[in-house]
């Protein structure tokens, strides 16, 4: 069943993506979202005794987090490392494989930065989570 879920054309994948979009968009009807997620996850997990409890808590936490981020939107910004940028700014990017060299080939996870306003009213960004990247040497032949 897992393979069917991963195939983009499968009905299970489409159902999963539909439910995922509802959670991301902060669906007001959390009970329906929980029910839909439990149905999809029950296909993958044969022993789903406490599945509804876990899913309900996860949806509640995701909704609370999204609400907090939405409220903090004025101060929090996500960003992606641009393809081709120099990898010398290690304050804004994270390269998990320290042996890789070259420019940014692909951003694999966005970064998060917070806007700080000093006593003079000037703003600057402080990186909270660095964007995760892969460098050219990991994918391109020399």
Image: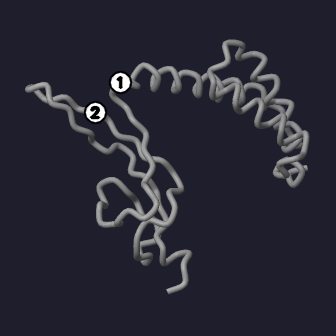
Q: Locate residue 138, reporting x and y percent.
A: 52, 75
Residue 47 sits above or below residue 97 on the image? above
Residue 74: assigned label: 1
Residue 13 sits above or below residue 136 on the image? above
Residue 102 sits above or below residue 29 on the image? below
Residue 115: assigned label: 2
Judge by depth and name the residue closer to the eye, 27 or 58: 27
Is residue 28 toward the left or the right of residue 94 in the image?
Answer: right
Q: Locate residue 36, reporting x and y percent.
A: 82, 26
Q: Determine the image quadrant of residue 115.
A: top left
Mark 2 residue crowding within 10 angstroms, few (<14) / some (14–19) / many (20+):
some
Label 2 SS: strand
Label 1 SS: loop
Type of colouring? one colour
Residue 108: assigned label: none
Q: Locate residue 98, reporting x and y percent.
A: 41, 73
Is residue 99 toward the left or the right of residue 13 in the image?
Answer: left
Q: CA distance from mark 1 to mark 2?
A: 8 Å
Q: Residue at x 47, y 22 (%)?
A: 70
Is residue 90 toward the left or the right of residue 104 in the image?
Answer: left
Of all residues, the one furthest to the left in this rendering is 120
CB under 8 Å between discs 1 and 2? yes
């Amino acid at each position: 069943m897992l393979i069917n879920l991963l195939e983009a054309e499968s009905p299970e994948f489409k159902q999963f993506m539909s439910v995922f979009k509802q959670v991301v968009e902060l669906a007001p009807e959390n009970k329906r979202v929980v029910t839909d997620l439990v149905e999809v996850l029950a296909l993958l997990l044969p022993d789903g005794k406490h599945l509804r409890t876990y899913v309900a808590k996860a949806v509640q936490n995701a909704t609370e987090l999204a609400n907090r981020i939405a409220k903090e939107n004025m101060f929090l910004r996500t960003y992606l490392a641009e393809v081709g940028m120099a990898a010398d700014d290690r304050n804004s990017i994270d390269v998990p494989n320290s042996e890789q060299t070259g420019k940014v080939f692909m951003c694999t996870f966005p970064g998060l930065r917070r806007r700080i306003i000093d006593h003079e009213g000037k703003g600057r960004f402080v990186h909270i989570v660095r964007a995760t990247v892969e460098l050219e040497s990991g994918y391109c032949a020399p």
